[in-house]
Amino acid sequence: MLPIRLGYESSTDALEEDWAELTAERKDLEPGEDMLKLGEAKLAEDRAKLGNDQKGTWSFYT
Protein backbone atom coordinates (compact mmCIF):
# COMPACT_ATOMS: atom_id res chain seq x y z
CA MET A 1 0.00 0.00 0.00
CA LEU A 2 1.37 3.36 -0.92
CA PRO A 3 1.12 6.12 1.64
CA ILE A 4 -0.43 9.47 0.86
CA ARG A 5 2.32 12.05 0.66
CA LEU A 6 1.74 15.46 2.17
CA GLY A 7 3.87 18.47 1.36
CA TYR A 8 6.21 19.12 -1.51
CA GLU A 9 8.52 16.41 -2.72
CA SER A 10 9.89 15.80 -6.17
CA SER A 11 8.00 13.08 -7.98
CA THR A 12 11.25 11.32 -8.88
CA ASP A 13 12.27 11.05 -5.22
CA ALA A 14 8.82 9.81 -4.25
CA LEU A 15 8.82 7.18 -7.00
CA GLU A 16 12.30 6.01 -6.06
CA GLU A 17 11.27 5.63 -2.41
CA ASP A 18 8.09 3.74 -3.34
CA TRP A 19 10.00 1.47 -5.73
CA ALA A 20 12.61 0.71 -3.05
CA GLU A 21 9.85 -0.13 -0.56
CA LEU A 22 8.05 -2.42 -3.02
CA THR A 23 11.30 -4.13 -4.00
CA ALA A 24 12.11 -4.78 -0.33
CA GLU A 25 8.62 -6.22 0.26
CA ARG A 26 8.92 -8.42 -2.82
CA LYS A 27 12.22 -9.86 -1.54
CA ASP A 28 10.43 -10.87 1.68
CA LEU A 29 7.88 -12.98 -0.20
CA GLU A 30 8.04 -16.73 0.04
CA PRO A 31 8.18 -18.62 -3.27
CA GLY A 32 4.67 -18.66 -4.73
CA GLU A 33 3.38 -15.93 -2.42
CA ASP A 34 1.51 -13.16 -4.20
CA MET A 35 1.91 -9.40 -3.68
CA LEU A 36 -1.88 -9.07 -3.86
CA LYS A 37 -2.39 -11.53 -1.02
CA LEU A 38 0.26 -9.71 0.99
CA GLY A 39 -1.56 -6.41 0.36
CA GLU A 40 -4.92 -7.91 1.36
CA ALA A 41 -3.42 -9.21 4.60
CA LYS A 42 -1.94 -5.76 5.34
CA LEU A 43 -5.31 -4.13 4.62
CA ALA A 44 -7.10 -6.52 6.98
CA GLU A 45 -4.48 -5.78 9.65
CA ASP A 46 -4.95 -2.02 9.21
CA ARG A 47 -8.74 -2.35 9.40
CA ALA A 48 -8.44 -4.36 12.60
CA LYS A 49 -6.39 -1.54 14.12
CA LEU A 50 -9.10 0.99 13.22
CA GLY A 51 -11.81 -0.85 15.10
CA ASN A 52 -15.46 -1.36 14.20
CA ASP A 53 -16.41 2.31 14.08
CA GLN A 54 -14.11 3.11 11.15
CA LYS A 55 -14.24 0.82 8.15
CA GLY A 56 -12.38 3.07 5.75
CA THR A 57 -15.36 5.02 4.45
CA TRP A 58 -14.97 8.72 3.84
CA SER A 59 -17.51 11.52 3.99
CA PHE A 60 -16.91 15.00 2.67
CA TYR A 61 -18.94 18.03 3.66
CA THR A 62 -18.75 21.38 1.90
Image (cartoon, helix red, strand yellow):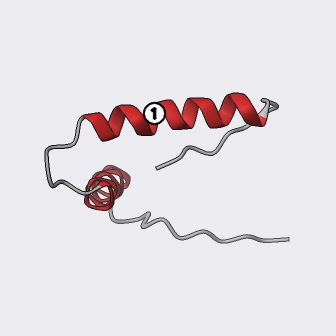
Residue 54: % across, % down: 44, 63
In this picture, residue 53 sits left or right of residue 42? right
The residue identified by callout 1 is: 21
Quarter of the image for residue 10 reads top right
Seen at 13% across and 47% down, the residue is 31
Seen at 26% across and 60% down, the residue is 37
* Amino acid of disc 1: Glu
Q: Is residue 23 above or below residue 41?
A: above
Q: Nearer the viewer, residue 62 or 38?
A: 38
Q: Nearer the viewer, residue 6 or 52?
A: 6
Seen at 29% across and 59% down, the residue is 44
Q: Residue furthest front?
A: 31
In this picture, residue 49 sits left or right of residue 30? right
Q: Residue furthest left?
A: 31
Q: Is residue 38 above or below residue 59?
A: above
Q: Find numbered disc 1 in the image and state the secondary structure of the residue it sits on.
A: helix
Seen at 70% across and 28% down, the residue is 13
Residue 55: % across, % down: 42, 67
How busy is the neighbourhood of tag 1: few (under 14 within 10 Å), some, or many (20 plus)? few
Quarter of the image for residue 30 reads top left
In this picture, residue 56 sits left or right of residue 52? right
